Image (cartoon, rainbow, N blue to C red):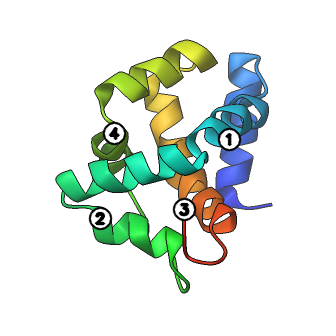
Amino acid sequence: MSVFDNLVDKVSSALGVDLHEKLSAQIQTLLQPEMIQNIVAKADEAGLGDKVRSWIGKGDNLPVTPDEIRQILGNSEVQALVSRTGLPAETLLPALSHFLPQAVDKKTPEGEA
């Protein structure tokens, strides 16, 4: 288990929620083909298109920060995720920055959304 997974477990315990379950459900909504295309478009607007394309393309996934996740998703999507999960943005964004690149990579094994 990674250091991040240990942290997620501790946060889950502290909040009294299953953080993995809440994030998994919301990440699945972000992995729909039209949503991936929307994420790429927003990333391009934010100057972060190369990072997101690295998740879709073959090869290593470039890391992303919580602030960059906010730029990529946009404030309205972040607030929607906060509402759906009940998690504060300060918890949600670091978790997404860790899990979203891998999830997009796995959802696009042929390099296409």
Q: Which mark is residue 70?
A: 4
- Residue 89: tell me if it is visible: yes
**SS state under label 1:** helix
Above or below residue 9? Residue 112 is: below
Residue 75: x %, y % from top left: 30, 27
Q: Amino acid at mark 2?
A: Gly
Q: Mark 3 against mark 2, which lies toward the viewer? A: 3
Residue at mark 4 to residue at mark 1: CA–CA distance: 17 Å
Residue 8: x %, y % from top left: 68, 41
| Image quadrant in which the N terminus is located | bottom right
Q: Which mark is residue 43?
A: none
Which residue position is annotated with label 2? 49
Which residue position is annotated with label 1? 28
Residue 89, by quadrant, is top left
Seen at 52% across and 31% down, the residue is 91
Residue 40: x %, y % from top left: 37, 56
Residue at mark 3 to residue at mark 2: CA–CA distance: 14 Å
| Image quadrant in which the C terminus is located | bottom right
Q: Residue furthest bottom?
A: 59
Decide which of 69, 46 is in the foreground and name it. 46
Which residue position is annotated with label 3? 113
Residue at mark 3 to residue at mark 4: CA–CA distance: 21 Å
Q: Amino acid at mark 4?
A: Arg
Decide which of 48, 95 is in the foreground and name it. 48
Mark 2 and mark 1 lie on one chain; the one further toward the N terminus is 1
